[in-house]
Amino acid sequence: MPYKNYSTEQLQRIDNAHHLHPFTDHDELRRKGVRVITGGEGAYVVDSDGNRILDGMAGLWCVNVGYGREELCDAAYQQMRELPYYNTFFKTTHPAVTLLAQRVAQLAPPNLNEVFFGASGSESNDTAIRTVRHYWALQGQPQKQIIISRRDAYHGSTIAAVSMGGMGAMQSQLGPHLPGFIHVMPPYDFELAHPGESREEFGLRAAKTVEDAIVAVGPQNVAAFIGEPIQGAGGVKIPPETYWPEVQRICRRYDVLLMLDEVITGFGRTGEWFAAQSMDIEADTMTVAKAITSGYQPLSAVLFSDKIARVLADGGEYYHGYTYSGHPVACAVALANIDIIEREGLIDRVRDDTGPYLTTRLAEMLGDHPLVGEVRGFGLLAAIEIVQDRETRARFPEHADAAGVVRDISIQHGLMMRAVGNTMILSPPLIWTRETIDEAAEIARLALDEAMNHLFRAGVSV
């Protein structure tokens, strides 16, 4: 590999001079220096200094089968030799995209049978936006344009996806937002539940905000409601069991489409192929990406319900698509990735063993820590709320960056966790075992202890 001729310091200097990173304070990065990841095997990545780090984020929510899978490399190599690229315009197809579309439809809920491919979750959410609006236009209701989303929702980084998402920091940098999107309360009872309100009651109240928004603007103007089954980048916000059934009832009552963003939760993370199956949600569109290839190739897709697909089929040419829609190499890797997940029983393992164990073990190890307000999990997703006061759930002042302190110490000790606002989150590869979870919990406890001492020394009361 050519990079082996470079030292860590040389790579850092080159990176600082030429590479703009996503979601990064570049001034801070250039002062502190970037970590150079050079390898990965199984559940671990390795940096250029030889440090072995347990990857608690599966790359970026995506490396579900772990690192170093020769089958996926071989699938890419063989496809590149046979057909490295061809488009799916011009009334053409190729075997990899055809077979992958069939495979994904077979795994998905029974009403989702047609698949449109892209290269990223952002791209596919843009596709979903365009398509639901086009659907209503074909139905003679072109005024149904508004899409209801939620605060703290993440649906991607394009202009349309940021407008639809509910990340305040991202929207503040967007400039004028695209019209046609409104946002309601997320189902986040840790911060938003009223005193004495049960989790079930809160779920119904959060769902009611969707109905209130529909009524306020008029059902005749609302195209769809979109949500992540579990809000991922917003802090692994797990809705109460009462939430999704009520949201679904509301959408049906007012003739509003239900869009699911399963970019994070798809392909096994919740203990089923899709969270729609874990939570019994019947969607009209479902966006997937990331784990469809375990991150080994860029690929995304939108699955459409039969009722939408029928209208599109009768509606003439739809002027939409991407150069890399259904890229043959990415599709070949996705097919091999799905084979691994099935053959190794990874979804059953998440549902019956490691998923419940992750939540239980983190609660046992961290639940009584002075910095922890709550531990929650669903499948192989988990969140740790960082608080200054456990009783009142008061947060640390923003300048303390308490969750960021925990994250940095955790990585130093060999566990990659992510800080989102005041919340630490985990989304590990599906190959994690009970032993891996024990290792992660022990490092997380150590990181919390050291973070508490750090915050105390910095003059932030704990």
Image (cartoon, rainbow, N blue to C red):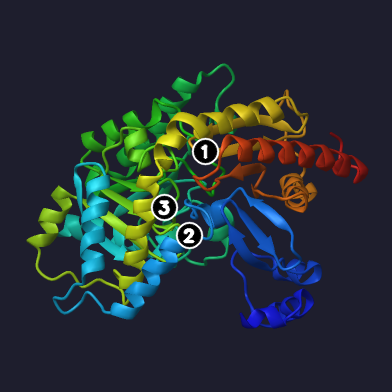
Mark 2: give few (<14), some (14-19) or many (20+) Cα within 10 Å: some
Question: Which residue is disc 2 drawn over?
Answer: 69
Front-lying residue, 256 or 428: 428
Residue at the image point whose x is 26% and y is 79% from the top: 86
Q: Judging from the image, what secondary structure is the residue with disc 1 in?
A: loop
Find residue 25 and report its horizontal and vertical position in percent: 69, 66
Circle nearer the N terminus (3, 2): 2
Q: Which image quarter: residue 309?
A: bottom left
Left or right of residue 49, residue 223 in this image:
left
Residue that sits furthest to the top in the current view: 196
Disc 1 versus disc 3: nearer the observer? 3
Q: Which image quarter: residue 346?
A: top left
State whether residue 283 is above or below residue 201. Answer: below
Please give the label number shown on residue 237: 1
Front-lying residue, 297 or 338: 338
Count of numbered circles in the view? 3
Circle nearer the N terminus (2, 1): 2
